[in-house]
Amino acid sequence: VGNIPNDGPVLLVGNHHSFIDWAMVQMACPRPLCIASNKDHFEKWYLRSMLKRLGMIRIDNRHPEDAMERIREQLLAGHAVVIFPTGEVSKSPHVEPFSIDYSSAVEGTDASIIPFYIQGLWGSNYSYSGSDMYASAADKTVVVGFGDSIPANTDPDQVRDIVRKISIEAWSYATNFY
């Protein structure tokens, strides 16, 4: 958490293993976040109103240009924005390849990137793990690990590699609670 600046533009980039990742990142972060989320979440009538009130940015994975412009506006205003560049909740426990190009959102801003990894939700009833989806989530330990700030023009493949390295640290830390 100490890697997240208290103010100024920052784009948080990380894995997406569950339907509640956005909430986990917000709870772990010391400042308000603007969350960029797959448009499919906005299609659900029971989520639409809440997501709009939270100021979430709707991303159409096939045409992300409008969302990238809204992210850019938030960054230019000095806000912190979260994006899950895999584009959807993962169907595997791995850090999937990034399918959303967020470079236009950070171009020309003073934003930096904070990579992150959320450990502990794959295998829960909030993921596509294929495990016992109705098992109790009470015994899950969730760890959100934040990496060091990196330049906004860092190659997305390098950012993904950093996220994978953070995953090792997060898993190691989480074993202290089992």
Image (spheres, grey):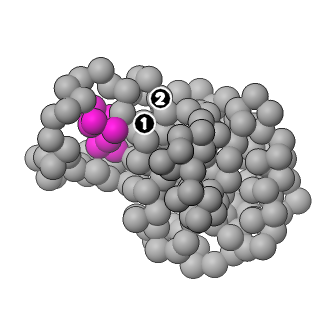
Q: Is residue 67 visible?
A: yes
Question: Percent from the top left, x then y, of residue 64?
Answer: 77, 39
Which residue appears at 24% of the width and 29% of the height?
A: 133
Residue at position x 69%, y 75% in the image: 8
Q: Residues within 10 Å of mark 2 (few under 14, many from 20)?
A: some
Quadrant of residue 63 within the rendered picture: top right
> Which numbered dot is residue 106?
none
| Residue 135 placement, left or right of 44 | left
Per the image, label 1 sits on a secondary structure element best described as loop
User: Are there few (<14), some (14-19), or many (20+) residues within 10 Å of tag 1?
Assistant: many
Q: Looking at numbered disc 2 in the image, what kind of residue is underneath it? A: Ser
Residue ID at (67%, 29%): 99
Residue 69 position, x and y percent, is: 83, 53
**Residue interval drawn in magenta:** 119-126
* Residue 4: % across, % down: 54, 68
Task: Kindly identify which residue carries mark 2.
Answer: 90
With respect to residue 142, does 53 lie above or below? below
User: Which residue is outermost to the bottom?
Assistant: 6
Q: Is residue 23 left or right of residue 148?
A: left
The N terminus, quarter of image: bottom left
Left or right relative to 57: residue 104: right
**Label 1 amino acid?**
His
The mark that comes first in sequence, 2 or 1, is 1
The one nearer the camera, 90 or 48, is 48
Residue that mark 1 sits on = 17
In the picture, residue 56 is in which quadrant?
bottom right
Q: State if disc 1 and disc 2 touch (CB < 8 Å).
A: yes
Name the magenta segment's main secondary structure. Answer: loop
